[in-house]
Image (cartoon, helix red, strand yellow):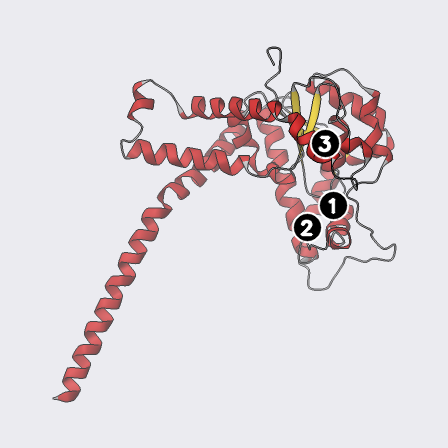
Amino acid sequence: MQNKVNRPIFVVGSPRSGTSILTWCLGQHPNIFAVPESNWMGDFVVNTAVVYQVGAARGHLSILSAMDISRDELLANFGRTIDDLILSHRLDLEKTRAAIPSLPEFMRRSLPEARTRWVDGTPEYSLHIYALKKLFPEAVFIHVLRDVRDVVRSMLNLHRLTGVQLVANEEEAYSYWLRTVKACIQAERAYGSNAVRRLPYNALIDHPEFAIRSMLDFVGEPFCARCLEPLSCQINSPDVPPDFVAEVPATDRRIVEEATKLYVELRNAAELTESSSAAADEMAAEFERRVQHLATVEDQLRNAVRTIQTLEKQCSAQKGNIRDEALL
């Protein structure tokens, strides 16, 4: 691993937008392999930041402060360790997949190349791009953008494939799409197209070779025709009945209109190339607010318990006084 590139790839976007298929396409590259959706690294960064802040406030991080080890340096070192662990256990993952006969052949095969990068297609990481950049400062992100109407139909029918409801109703599906896509667009503004690149889902379907070539060029890898193979298979695709209608009267039409309008704007808008310091500051502030909330929630809970105990004692005393007065 002496020549490895510590630059993981994250495929983000709303669930049911094609994040899985693109992840598997990139995972066929001789220098990249696909890891399972993880969904823990964002919270890991937040929790580490909370521990750092609470420890610093209580004087428990004297060794780190004495050695001038900042929170960002600590997180980046954790990131390098995670990267090394994932790369060193690649063969274990491939052995596990090879033992599952129900998986497509391209998911089960073990490739001989000593790959030095990995790609993770966890949609929830759309909400944790700032945290992941702290863990992996050189990470790159591909935002797969799909028509919100198609995403909603797919979300509402996912139970046909997995038996599990991803969302409860149409309104929740539109809100889910809005939340993840807005987070990705904010990251595009904050970091620019050198770190976050948008890929329309239609381009992946209608012009697959061009789309894969452009994404490999973005992540800094040469084109490999093998990356097109997963596109010939339908994976993780629910069976949506042709007569299925998503619209229900109870849905807040304002949310539908907001999501539909945003998709049209993004579909027609040119991709942002320059980073915005204002957008980056906004993401940093959001992250710090979350850390601050979690860092103080224990004290808030402790104070609330004390208040409840005090009120219980007061109520008990008042009941005792009332009982005594009744006896008199």
Is 111 displayed left or right of 167 in the figure?
right
Is 255 displayed left or right of 301 in the figure?
right
Under circle 1, the secondary element is helix
Which comes sooner in the sequence, label 1 or label 3?
3
Q: Which amino acid does label 1 sit on?
A: Val
Which residue is at a point 66% across and 31% down the rendered structure image? 93
Judge whether 315 appears above or below 233 on screen. Answer: below
Q: Which label sits on residue 148?
A: 1
Percent across and percent down for residue 211 are 80, 26
Under circle 2, the secondary element is helix
Percent across and percent down for residue 227 are 80, 25
- The Cα–Cα distance between marks 2 and 3, rounded to whole angstroms, is 23 Å
Q: Quadrant of the C terminus?
A: bottom left
Which residue is at a point 72% across and 64% down the rendered structure image? 249
Q: Nearer the viewer, residue 51 or 97?
A: 97
For label 3, count other residues whose C-alpha is less than 10 Å away and answer few (under 14), some (14-19) or many (20+): many
- Give the label, 1 or 3, closer to the camera: 3
Note whether residue 189 is visible. Answer: yes
